[in-house]
């Protein structure tokens, strides 16, 4: 990983990779969403609202995967002092927060016709809301220290990112540990309880959103690195 | 209850959020890299 510690070497890979992730991601997303909306049949019980699955599940996955990315970046920053890890952690936070908010909003919209309520303070929804608050806290902490940390995050923010990861298994197991309106795990390593005729577009939207998320993180990392470069140049000029 | 209203609402929210995020990230990146490039060209 230290091969990519040099920003110039990282940018050489990140520039083409941004495009390679963005356009295929967008294409897969549009194909998956189009098929989910117009090709797959309605569910025998939930009717057409089941189509929300194709955007709700990827948003939930990215909200949780984003925080795992922050935790891994924090570990790399604290243990191996990788110079780009702090930048990566900061770059992941805003898209992670957005997809967590989208997961909560689409879940709420799905809940109204399915459960008869917009919100329920059960384990899954509450732990997901806690994740959103963790993201907001992380962003506030990261912004507070951005200038001193050259666009990255402070060690305290990194520790916050690591400790916050304890919420991820809680979100994952919440539907097993507590009674919930939310359905139990329907996609596991052993298979899926969702019928194949409904499941297949989910692969497209999951992959599409994930590629797009990668492209967004790379764009944000490139922005931070470019601003660092400008800041360093200005400081050199000011010193004469 | 019209189920499609909920479906369209959820998709509109998701896609508008994603598009706004992509556009804002792209614009920030372009402007930051343009400033950095301008400074490199000057020196």
Image (cartoon, coloured by chain):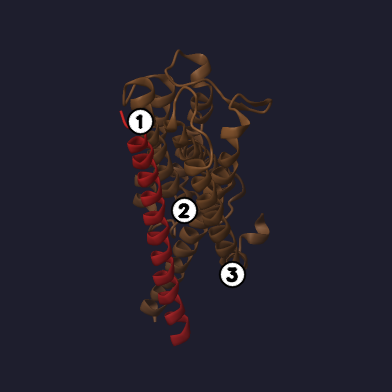
- Which of disc 2 and disc 3 is earlier in sequence? 3
Of the residues tagged 3 and 2, which is closer to the observer?
2
The residue at which mark 3 appears reads as A8
Q: Secondary structure at mark 3?
A: helix
Residue B18 can be seen in this image: yes
Q: Residue furthest bottom?
A: B42
Relative image position of residue B38 (x, y in whole percent): 43, 81
Q: Secondary structure at mark 2?
A: helix
* Chain depicted in brown: A
- Which dot marks residue A108? 1
Residue B19 in percent (x, y) is at 40, 55
Give the image quarter of residue B5.
top left
Q: Position of residue A223 (x, y in %)?
A: 45, 64
Q: Chain B is shown in which shade?
A: red
Query: Count the marks: how many?
Result: 3
Residue A153 in the image, given as x and y percentages of width and height: 45, 50
Q: Chain of mark 1?
A: A
Q: Residues at badges 3 and 2 in contact (C-beta under 8 Å)?
A: no
- Mark 1 nearby-residue class (10 Å; few <14, some 14–19, many ≥20): many
Query: Are callouts 3 and 2 both on one chain?
Result: yes
Residue A27: quarter of image: bottom right
Disc 3 to disc 2, C-alpha distance? 18 Å
- What residue sits right under mark 2 in the picture? A91
């Amino acid at each position: 990983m230290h091969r990519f510690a040099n920003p110039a070497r990282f940018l050489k890979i990140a520039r083409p990779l941004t495009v390679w992730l963005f356009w295929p991601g967008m294409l897969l997303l549009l194909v998956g969403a189009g098929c989910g909306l117009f090709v797959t049949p309605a569910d025998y019980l939930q009717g057409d609202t089941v189509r929300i699955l194709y955007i709700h599940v990827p948003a939930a996955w990215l909200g949780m995967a984003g925080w795992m990315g922050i935790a891994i970046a924090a570990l790399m920053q604290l243990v191996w002092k990788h110079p780009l890890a702090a930048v990566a952690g900061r770059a992941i936070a805003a898209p992670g927060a957005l997809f967590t908010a989208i997961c909560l909003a689409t879940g709420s919209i799905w809940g109204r016709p399915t459960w008869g309520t917009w919100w329920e303070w059960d384990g899954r929804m509450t732990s997901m809301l806690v994740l959103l608050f963790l993201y907001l806290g992380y962003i506030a902490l990261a912004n507070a220290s951005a200038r001193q940390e050259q666009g990255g995050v402070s060690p305290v923010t990194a520790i916050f990112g690591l400790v916050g990861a304890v919420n991820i298994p809680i979100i994952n197991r919440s539907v097993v540990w507590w009674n919930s309106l939310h359905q139990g795990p329907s996609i596991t390593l052993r298979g899926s309880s969702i019928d194949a005729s409904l499941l297949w577009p989910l692969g497209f939207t999951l992959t599409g959103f994930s590629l797009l998320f990668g492209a967004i993180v790379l764009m944000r990392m490139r922005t931070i690195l470019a601003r660092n470069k400008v800041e360093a140049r200005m400081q050199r000029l000011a010193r004469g | 209850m019209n189920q499609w209203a909920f479906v369209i609402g959820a998709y509109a929210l998701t896609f508008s959020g994603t598009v706004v995020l992509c556009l804002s990230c792209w614009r920030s990146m372009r402007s930051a890299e343009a400033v950095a490039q301008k400074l490199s060209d000057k020196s």
